[in-house]
Amino acid sequence: MTPTPRGALSGALPRILSILVASVLAAALLSPAPAAAQSVGSTIGYETIVSHDGTELKAKVITPTGVQGPHPLLVMPSAWGTPHLLYVGAAKKLAEESGYQVVTYSSRGFWDSGGGIEVAGPEDRADASAVIDWALANTDSDADRIGMAGISYGAGISLLTAAEDDRVKVVGSMSGWADLEASLYPNETIDVQSAELLLLAGNLVGQPGELLREAEREYRAGNVDPILEMAPDRSASTKVDRLNANGTAVMIAHGWNDGMFPVGHMADFYEELSGPKRMMLTPGDHATPEVFGAFGLPNEVWEDLGRWFDHHLKGEDNGIDTEQPVLVKPNNGSEWSSHADWPSVTTDTDEYYLGEPSKDWLRWQSTGAMEAEPQTGWDYDFRTGIGSTAESGTVMLSGALQQFFDVPTGVLLPTVDRYRAAVWTSPAYPDGARVAGTPEVTFTVTPTAADQSVFVYLYAINDRGTGSLLSHAPYTLRDATPGEPVTVETELSSVVWDVPAGHRLAVVVDSRDARYTAESRTGNRVEVTSPEETPTRVSIPFTR
């Protein structure tokens, strides 16, 4: 497989992860247990579990000692491209501090497990059920108290298995997905960085199954249909009725800047669940909010997950069922707030109508007005094929920089080429504001080609024009009629962000972004208009 230039940077990630897992895990395993748990220990075994079709799955089995069984059982499928070692640190803590029997295994096709990578298909869900069968037959596990948890790929397999195997009472989904198409093909736009990273890791440390090999061949040829065809069966959003019927207690943890599985679709999935549920949204990129907790190090997500399991599997009255279940931490802040549900995060919405932009770079503060009243009858065109300085960042990197170092994906607004982008700015917020929820944008574009991509960005801008990316969305017109206007209505990625006092908001629309495959070609143009029947506008959610 030939990676893209961005894929070349991502190619080092599996090696880095292996080194990180080994070093941090060693430190976690050698750390002494808390004083209260000194009398309880654990053993760690390496086992071969024969799955439903004879495939051998390699697993780490962590068994508590010094505490009487039967033990509640936790099954943890590995994340994409990682082995069973990923969770051993967390599993050891769960065994010693709470008495769980834990089985963490390398997912089919990866590392030391047999078979081919099936992308969370029926074989993977049957594997998880076979691991449960093995644990009930070979360990002192309680058949009435079974939970599953995982990061990324392990999260997706856990949700899908729980929908099909009603023995799974509780699920912890960390940096997972609920809608595979919405994740990898948002608004009919290929998320090329995520696709290349997934394919690279699969080929580097795994054995792709025939379905994945065929999907890659077609993807290289520009055909995404095989991926779209496999997506519904591999999406928990299509099986939410089964989860609700089973009464599965689901906890979701996700990073605002997850570049692989956008946070907004997980919030939508959360709202569809009717059983016990909890959601934590926090700064971070794909898997970065939870990875150190997987190694057994202190981590807010894993601590809450432990309380979730303790209440729903062990019946502990630890208060988690009486707390407001939606917890959010601003992407640029450190304090959690709690809410009754996801819509309650937003208490107010500002509707801005976008006026005619200007191509004058020197007038960036009023380059295009964001007004309270409709601004219609204007048109503005820009060239396509070459991007501007507005970008959504790099998957697995940009969100981590925001999380750990408070370094946002930025822009210097005066440098955005007005001949290749449209730019609007709002009035300043003298007292600051908290953007909280899912921004939405409506605009009308007239393409000059059948397939054209546009990218929408929302920034918070200081008085010098330096901006931080709050949210963005790709959008690709496919099979459009050149010269005919198309009204685009789309959500941007969900966010909670504290806009500092004196800053203003800015909206940028251009035609290229390095994270995605853009269909816009050099030499074409896009015209943005604001007709009277559908004025160009942006809706900004706030907590006030």
Image: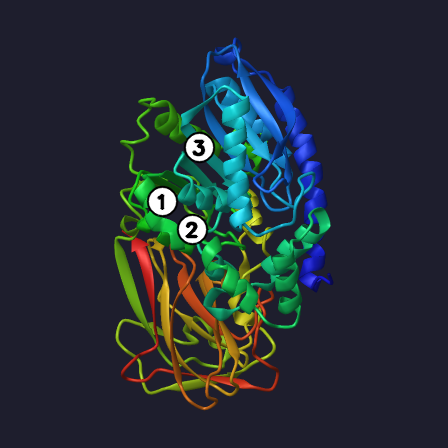
Residue farthest to the front, as pictured: 53
Q: Which three-letter amino acid code belongs to the residue tagged 2?
A: Ala
Q: Quadrant of residue 26?
A: top right
Q: Secondary structure at mark 3?
A: strand
- Residue 330, percent from left and from top: 41, 46
| Residue 359 horizontal side relative to residue 15, left or right | left
The quadrant in which the N terminus is found is bottom right
Using a 10 Å C-alpha cutoff, classify the residue at mark 3 as few (fewer than 14 neighbours), some (14 to 19) or many (20 or more).
Answer: many
- Residue 178, percent from left and from top: 44, 52
Q: Which three-letter amino acid code belongs to the residue tagged 1?
A: Leu
| Vertical placement of residue 342 versus 465, above or below | above
Q: CA distance from mark 2 to mark 3?
A: 17 Å
**Does the rendering let one see residue 151?**
no
Query: Which numbered tag is attached to residue 495?
Result: none
Residue farthest to the bottom, as pictured: 483
Residue at label 2? Answer: 236
Residue at label 3? Answer: 147
| Residue 411 horizontal side relative to residue 98, left or right | right
Query: Which numbered tag is attached to residue 243?
Result: 1
**Does the rendering let one see residue 228?**
yes
